[in-house]
Image: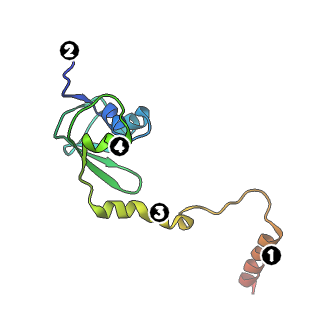
């Protein structure tokens, strides 16, 4: 069976253009319906060709890319723009930056081991306000 050089697997392509760190992560994203090609949820084995529009649902934002050229091997980050065109609106990138700016609001407080003397006093003061 001869492979068409103008087509490649979706999971392999997403890994090649550095949308996911590993191919298994890109495969998992396709299986969980986080990746949509031309408006349809697809399997990781879907053949991608030039001109396809891929939407990827990340935890904080959605990214839209257009395939400019198909490739099978992973490339350096500098060359990614030769193979994909980013169609993501700026509002989506703002959504992505929000948790980074307010990281303190999104991370739970550390509760390792016993409270320190200061923490214990703060807790006692807090609880005494409710008892009165």
Residue at the spot 57% in from the left edge and 61% down from the top edge = 107
Q: Does 16 appear above or below 93? A: above
When the figure is inspected, residue 19 is found, relative to residue 110, above or below; the finding is above
The residue sitting at 73% across, 84% down in the picture is: 129
Could you tell me residue 78's position as x and y percent? 35, 43
Local packing at callout 3 (Cα closer than 10 Å; few below 14, some 14-19, many 20+) is some
Q: Nearer the viewer, residue 22 or 80?
A: 80
**Mark seen at residue 2:** 2
Q: Secondary structure at mark 4?
A: helix
Secondary structure of residue under mark 1: helix
Closer to the chain start, of discs 2 and 1, is 2
Work out whether mark 4 precedes mark 1 in sequence or the reverse, and give the earlier one: 4
Which residue is the extreme one toward the right? 117
Q: Is residue 6 left or right of residue 95?
A: left
| Residue 64 spot, x, y in % from top left | 26, 50
| Label 1 sits on residue | 121
Q: Position of residue 82 (x, y in %)?
A: 25, 41
Check disc 3 and report its element: helix, strand or loop: helix
Residue 19 seen in this snapshot: no
- Marks 2/1: CA–CA distance: 73 Å
| Residue denoted by label 4 | 78
Question: Which is in the foreground here, disc 3 or disc 1?
Answer: 3
Mark 2 vs mark 4: which is more N-terminal? 2
Residue found 40% across the figure and 41% down from its top = 20
């Amino acid at each position: 069976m001869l492979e068409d050089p103008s087509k490649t697997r979706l999971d392999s392509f997403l890994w090649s253009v550095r949308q996911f760190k590993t191919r298994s992560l890109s495969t998992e994203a396709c299986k969980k319906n986080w990746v949509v090609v031309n408006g349809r949820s697809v399997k990781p084995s879907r053949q991608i060709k030039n001109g396809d529009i891929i939407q990827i649902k990340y935890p904080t934002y959605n990214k839209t890319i257009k395939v400019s050229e198909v490739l099978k091997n992973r490339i350096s980050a500098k060359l990614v723009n030769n193979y994909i065109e980013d169609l993501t609106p700026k509002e989506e990138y703002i959504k992505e930056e929000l948790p980074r700016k307010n990281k303190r609001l999104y991370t739970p407080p550390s509760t390792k081991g016993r409270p320190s003397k200061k923490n214990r006093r703060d807790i006692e003061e807090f609880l005494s306000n409710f008892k009165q």
